[in-house]
Amino acid sequence: MRPPLLDPLFAPVSTLQGVGPKIAQLLTEFLGSSPDREATVADLLFHIPSGLIDRRHRPGIAYSESGQIVTLDVTIDRHQAPPRGSKAPYRITAFDDTGSIAFVFFHPRRDWLMKMFPEGERRIVSGKVEWFNDRPQMVHPDYVVSPEEAETLPALEPVYPLTAGLSPKTLQKAIGTALERIPHLPEWLDEAHQSQNLWPDFTASLTTLHHPQEQEDLSPASPALARVAYDELLASQLALALVRASMRKLGGIARRPSGRLQRDVIAALPYTLTGSQQTAIAEINGDLAEPVRMLRLLQGDVGAGKTVVALAAMAQAVEAGGQAALMAPTEILARQHFASMGPICEKVGLRLALMTGKDTTRERRLTQERLDAGEIDILVGTHALFQGSVTFKDLALVVVDEQHRFGVHQRLALSAKGRGVDVLVMTATPIPRTLLLSSFGDMDVSRLTDKPAGRKPVTTVSVSLDRLDEIISRIRAAIAEGQKVYWVCPLVEESEKIDLAAVEDRHRVLEQALRQRISLVHGRMSADEKDAAMQDFKEGRTRALVATTVIEVGVDVPDATIIVIEHAERFGLAQLHQLRGRVGRGEKPSSCVLLYKGPLGETAGARLNIMRQTNDGFLIAEEDLRLRGGGEILGTRQSGTPGFRIANVEDHADLMEVARDDARLILERDPELQSDRGQALRCLLYLFARDEAIRLLRAG
């Protein structure tokens, strides 16, 4: 149950004075609360200003810079109304000791303007100055008051992100009322940590943020903002730590086989393991040997050899008497895993099976019978198959490929498929450390940092689309030498039809220019058509493949050496890096051509530069975070990235580390959150909508 103390903060915004049904609806849509519940007082309080207007700035007309917000003490000279029926604006000229200015109004009410700006009288006017043809003007000033009312002009005014129909004054008034509703809350921060940082309490921090006295009050490092950001990060880390504790409490099984089967798997590989693969396998073996459930994230750049590590882990689980399952995000990938693991499994005697959505009811039933009888050691399939009725005789280990489609809830649900199921999650999206902590703080992490032997770095160049003919003739020469080429066309979000036309058009142009058949793959083709086109390319019946970004994940053609990415400026860094990983998989040197349409914007230019400079996925991920901000790192907003309202992943990365350590220490000392600080921390979890974690406490 939510502590009654918090009730005033969870009251709907419509209970605030001046917020009617229409404004309440606007706020609910704008503040991103779930559509089925009205925005709350807390939602409003966590809507922090993005800047500050200083109306104390009074430079005089002649010294006002263009684009600046200034306050002027002027004498009104005269009104210039436009002729009837004209669309010209209404102008009022005024002057001070330094010069003259025009106040400009569109669609004005003349009687109102005469009253507000009486000719010959003094007025204090505040707003943004623009200079045109060496003359200053102010369009629709923010404030006009007489000298007697000068005190009513706000000296400092916070600037909030707004939505259509919501005026700054309405929002400020509502927030002012909301601040009065904050109850006296218990302190959930560690006393020493709080005083060392000179952080105010929660209420004082929010008050400072909504009534800033200086621009510095809103900077990421200000005590008020750092305090509330830390509160939000601590709530998130504490929730993740509780998930982790609950998974561990469910108890694991110590799996300590001799390791013979794993050694056989490694011996059957046509190459030796890299150092980081050996380290990752050792870390996983260590986890499996403990009577605590494994929850580990295996991060490896494109082509770093994650599947081999996963197979070694599954061999260990099978030798210990259990079954293993590998879940892939798409059917193409599931089939690819099945095909790549098949020969090794056969060699060492591991019984491997595949289950996909294409299986007939009979095939499905037979596979299920073999699973229940323990006649299948490793089952490969898509995520969807493991959500329903599939059962195992004794599921010991689940490997999940491409984690970002797979959140905390699925991790918990999976565990219900067996006793003490260990979980290994793999990702080829290099995730910056700060995001790792925020999304996967409940997991241990292994990183594959070195590429398998024989992998050559890919040479990357960027070329303007104006030189398209030149690129095509180089491709013709490369194909004549026996090379294979990918040509990727972008997806334009607005229209699938345009995309289709663009990719089919490019396919036709290339077939004519290269005078040979070329494979084509796009999203509107059936799975069979895609597979056939890929197979032609893989087996060399075609030497070039034109595709949309469907080839981004996991397509493996080791002898492809060139990838051309058309309109590279439209892609994010992580996606460009994933696409580039399709080449450079064999012995031969490979190249990636980024075709762009100029002129390039600043961010797009920076992206292409980074791609030319480095092949290091982890470095690229850090840069991607810097260029995009945290929200978009994994491609889409919902893909496992933390939705923080106040904390900023970049600015508050150091606080994230501290919050993680703090959360772990709290649960070591007070696992049930029963102490005084524990009770206060329960308030914190509710306040930042992390109350699911409290249900885990109760369930445990």
Image (tube, rainbow, N blue to C red):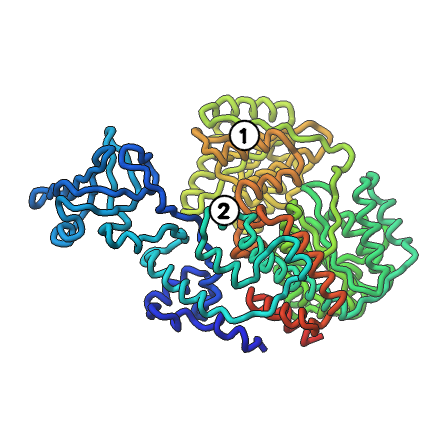
Q: Nearer the viewer, mark 2 or mark 1?
A: 2
Query: Label for residue 641?
Result: none
**Three-letter residue code for mark 2:** Glu
Q: Quadrant of residue 27?
A: bottom left
What's the residue at 62%, 29% (across, down)?
613
Q: CA distance from mark 2 to mark 1?
A: 64 Å
Q: Residues within 10 Å of mark 2 (few under 14, many from 20)?
A: few
Q: Quadrant of the N terminus?
A: bottom right
- Label 1 residue SS: loop
Q: Is residue 131 left or right of residue 275?
A: left
Residue 570 rendering spot, x and y as whole percentages: 48, 39
What's the residue at 73%, 66% (across, down)?
667
Query: Mark 1 highlights which residue?
Result: 516
Q: Quadrant of the C terminus?
A: bottom right
What's the residue at 46%, 48% (across, down)?
214
Q: Nearer the viewer, residue 384 or 290?
A: 290
Q: Quadrant of residue 313?
A: bottom right
Q: Marks 1 and 2: in contact by CB < 8 Å?
A: no
Above-or-below relation of 536 to 459: below
What's the residue at 59%, 42% (across, down)?
574
Residue 96 rendering spot, x and y as whole percentages: 22, 37
- Label 2 residue SS: helix
**Three-letter residue code for mark 1:** Gln
Residue 648 rendering spot, x and y as whole percentages: 55, 50
The answer to which of marks 2 and 1 sits earlier in the sequence is 2
Query: Label for residue 216?
Result: 2
Q: Is residue 201 left or right of residue 26?
A: right
Above-or-below relation of 567 to 107: above
Q: Nearer the viewer, residue 461 or 645?
A: 645
